[in-house]
Image (tube, rainbow, N blue to C red):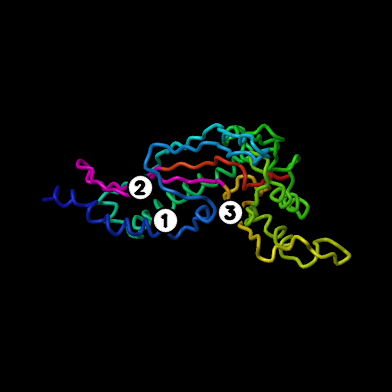
């Protein structure tokens, strides 16, 4: 009789505990979902291939053949899914004798642990934006001073030659970058930044630059030409490992997050001890392929 009762311990607890767990996951801010491209995957990995279309149309003298061109093929980037999980174990005695409802709070902690790991992993794309260990389709870091073109044309930069903290002049340089963008054939691209990503310590500097009617720290009431009028917003991200780093993002960026298995839960009983076991499991990958759409600095 005692074995039957203990054996059903996990099943008796699971519905309410999992409801608390998922409520806690949903309750977390999940800032990353507001920024990254999120998709589902049905394979062990996803892969992107670098490609540039045809060049510009050329003149065809009367009676002569049309000039034929071929697309340019570059390298590929593979996104390999990784599994993650965390569990919690409780004895029947601990559950029964818990006077302060500590055990009933544990599912929320599992939910927080799951949400936190996903958030950290998603933002790791920007945290590693200047690292030579995390490369895109051109074989370079997300933010680099010499991105290559498939047509072999002049290299392109999406970061300052000397990294600087966020300021009016640094922001203006970022805006100019987007206005001068070209594709892998050297043709102009229309990309407009819509978000500034900064650590909370730079909130006031950002607000001064994009919200002031007059140029900050100017004594002659010079009009602030960088005032965004709502065209560019800012997001305070506490998951940036370098508080000085900042980024401008276009809506057309290529920062990607793939779900292979969204968070799912399971429960079981330990037959010998009677303990109830609970776990949450997820599988996903993240990264970038194309650098265009991002401008960043690691700060001064």
- The residue closer to the viewer here, 69 or 170, is 69
Q: Residue at x 75, y 66 (%)?
A: 212
Q: State how far apart marks 1 and 2 are (Cα).
A: 11 Å
Q: Which mark is residue 25?
A: 1
Residue position for label 3: 251
Is residue 296 placed above or below 215 in the rendered structure? above
Question: Measured from the top left, where is residue 144 in percent x and y?
Answer: 67, 38
**Mark in the foreground, 3 or 2:** 3
Callout 2: 10 Å neighbours few (<14), some, many (20+)? many
Image coords of residue 72 (percent x, y): 58, 34
Residue closest to the far right: 220
Residue 22 locus on image (x, y percent)? 37, 57
Residue 241 visible in rendering: yes
First along the sequence among labels 1 and 2: 1
Q: Position of residue 210 (x, y in %)?
A: 71, 61
Local SS, label 2: strand
> Which residue is at a point 60% across and 32% down the rendered structure image?
139
Q: Is residue 51 left or right of residue 143?
A: left
Q: Is residue 277 magenta?
A: yes
Mark number for residue 240?
none
Question: Which residues make up the magenta segment?
Answer: 254-283
């Amino acid at each position: 009789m005692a074995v039957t009762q203990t054996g059903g311990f996990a099943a008796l607890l699971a519905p309410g505990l999992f409801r608390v767990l998922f409520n806690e996951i949903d309750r977390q801010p999940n800032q990353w979902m507001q920024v990254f491209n999120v998709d589902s995957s049905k394979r062990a990995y996803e892969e992107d291939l670098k490609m540039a279309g045809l060049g510009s149309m050329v003149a065809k003298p009367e009676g002569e053949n049309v000039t034929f061109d071929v697309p340019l093929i570059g390298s590929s980037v593979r996104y390999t899914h990784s599994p993650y999980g965390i569990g919690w174990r409780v004895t029947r005695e601990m559950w029964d004798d818990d006077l302060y409802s500590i055990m009933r709070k544990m599912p929320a902690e599992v939910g927080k642990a799951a949400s936190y790991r996903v958030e950290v992993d998603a933002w790791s794309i920007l945290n590693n934006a200047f690292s030579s260990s995390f490369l895109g389709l051109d074989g370079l870091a997300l933010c680099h001073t010499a991105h290559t073109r498939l047509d072999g044309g002049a290299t392109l930069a999406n970061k300052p030659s000397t990294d600087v903290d966020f300021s009016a002049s640094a922001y203006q340089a970022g805006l100019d970058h987007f206005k001068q963008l070209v594709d892998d054939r050297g043709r102009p691209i229309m990309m407009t930044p819509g978000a500034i990503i900064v650590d909370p310590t730079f909130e006031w500097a950002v607000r001064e630059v994009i919200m002031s009617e007059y140029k900050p720290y100017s004594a002659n009431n010079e009009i602030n030409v960088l005032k965004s009028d709502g065209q560019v917003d800012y997001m305070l991200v506490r998951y940036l490992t370098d508080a000085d780093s900042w980024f401008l993002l276009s809506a057309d960026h290529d920062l990607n997050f793939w779900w292979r298995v969204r968070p799912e839960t399971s429960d079981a009983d330990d037959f010998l001890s009677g303990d109830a076991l609970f776990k949450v499991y997820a599988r996903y990958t993240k990264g970038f392929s194309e650098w265009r759409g991002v401008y960043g600095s690691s700060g001064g």
